[in-house]
Image: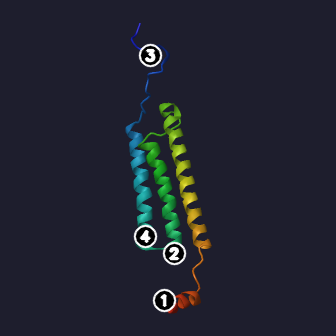
Amino acid sequence: MSADPHAAHGHGEIEMPHATMRDYVIGFVLSVILTAIPFWLVMTMPLSAGVTGAIIMGFAVVQIVVHMIFFLHMTPKAEGGWSLTSLVFTVIVVVIMLAGSLWVMHHLNTNMMPMPHEATGQLASQAP
């Protein structure tokens, strides 16, 4: 009988991700391609600045996913799915915080009316 009562049920096992050299090479090649294309777009400027910026942001998101899959091994199978679940929760919280902050700043900007020039001129002329 083992010293750990949970060992018989498999509760103490930590599943390590299994990656092969092929997985790392695929991840590396994809990372290089996803870096070289935006670099080429910026250096040659074949498109407008707005379109180039949007394409670069798209490539950045794809590269984040490539790094999470090929280098961080975040798959639904890794660690019983808990690493992916915690990542999804973190992304949801960050999106809520960013959206809320942008919403508050937008409404502060639109609802905080500047004083008219006449009122500021009258206040300046009435100063002792």
**Total marks drawn?**
4
Compare marks 2 and 1 and give the one earlier in the sequence.
2
> In front of the other: label 1 or label 3?
1
Which residue is the site of mark 1? 127
- Mark 1, secondary structure of its residue: loop
Question: What's the residue type where badge 3 is placed?
Answer: Ala
* In the rendered image, the vertical position of residue 14 relative to residue 6, given as above or below: below
Mark 3 closeness class: few <14, some 14–19, many ≥20 residues within 10 Å: few
* In the rendered image, the vertical position of residue 10 relative to residue 93, given as above or below: above
Q: Nearer the viewer, residue 75 or 85?
A: 85
Circles 2 and 3 in contact, beta carbons < 8 Å? no
Q: Report the Cα–Cα distance between label 2 and label 3.
A: 60 Å
Which residue is the site of mark 2? 48
Question: What's the residue type where badge 4 is placed?
Answer: Val
> In front of the other: label 2 or label 3?
3
Question: What's the residue type where badge 1 is placed?
Answer: Ala
Which residue is the site of mark 4? 42
- Mark 4, secondary structure of its residue: helix
- Residue furthest to the bottom in view is 125
| Residue at horizontal 54 percent and vertical 49 percent from the top | 93
Question: What's the residue type where badge 2 is placed?
Answer: Ser
- Mark 3, secondary structure of its residue: helix
Q: Report the Cα–Cα distance between label 2 and label 1.
A: 52 Å
